[in-house]
Image (cartoon, grey):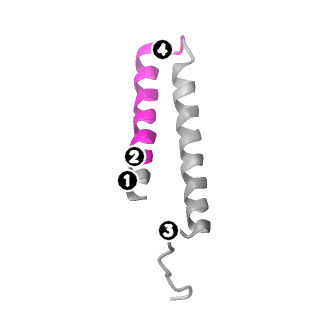
């Protein structure tokens, strides 16, 4: 589980980096930056939903931080 989340974070950062690269090189002439940012948002939402699903299935446990302290 830790490896999957780490790989997802690396892919999100790589997508953000590619969007930065396309922004600097394309100068707004193509849609590659938009697609890179859309992919980043999609990966982030997918990771969040996967973490919620994994918690629901019992694959991961919450830390149990007590409220009100």
- Which is more toward the observer, 60 or 15? 60
Query: Which residue lies at the image location 49% right of the left edge and 68% below the top edge?
Result: 60
Left or right of residue 7: residue 59: right
- Which range of residues does the magenta coloring cover? 8-29
How crowded pointer 2 is (Cα within 10 Å; few <14, some 14-19, many 20+) is rated as few
Q: Residue at x 52, y 37 (%)?
A: 40
User: Image check: 31 left or right of 9?
Assistant: right
- Alpha carbon distance from label 1 to label 3: 13 Å
Determine the CA span between mark 3 and mark 2. 17 Å
Q: Quadrant of the N terminus?
A: bottom left
Residue pointed to by mark 4: 27
**In whole angstroms, how far apart are the C-alphas of marks 1 and 4?**
36 Å
Of callouts 1 and 4, the N-terminal one: 1
Mark 3 and mark 2 lie on one chain; the one further toward the N terminus is 2
Q: Where is residue 32 in the image (x, y as percent from the top left)?
A: 52, 20
In contact (CB < 8 Å): disc 4 and disc 3: no
Q: Do the residues labelled 2 and 1 touch (CB within 8 Å)?
A: yes
The label on residue 3 is: 1
Q: Which mark is residue 7?
A: 2
Q: Is mark 4 on a helix, strand or loop?
A: loop
Instruction: Estimate how packed mark 1 is, as few (under 14), some (14 to 19) or many (20 or more) residues with alpha carbons within 10 Å.
Output: few
| Label drawn at residue 60 | 3
Q: Which of marks 1 and 3 is nearer the N terminus?
A: 1
Q: In this view, does 62 lie to the left or right of 2?
A: right
- Marks 2 and 4, Cα distance to the nearest angstrom? 30 Å
Regarding mark 3 in the picture, which secondary structure is present there?
A: loop
Snapshot quadrant of residue 2: bottom left
x then y, percent, for residue 31: 57, 18
């Amino acid at each position: 589980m830790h490896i999957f989340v780490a790989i997802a974070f690396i892919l999100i950062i790589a997508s953000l980096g590619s969007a930065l690269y396309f922004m600097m090189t394309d100068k707004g002439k193509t849609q590659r930056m938009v697609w890179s940012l859309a992919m980043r948002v999609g990966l982030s939402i997918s990771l969040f939903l996967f973490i919620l699903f994994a918690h629901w299935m019992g694959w991961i446990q919450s830390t149990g931080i007590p409220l009100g302290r």
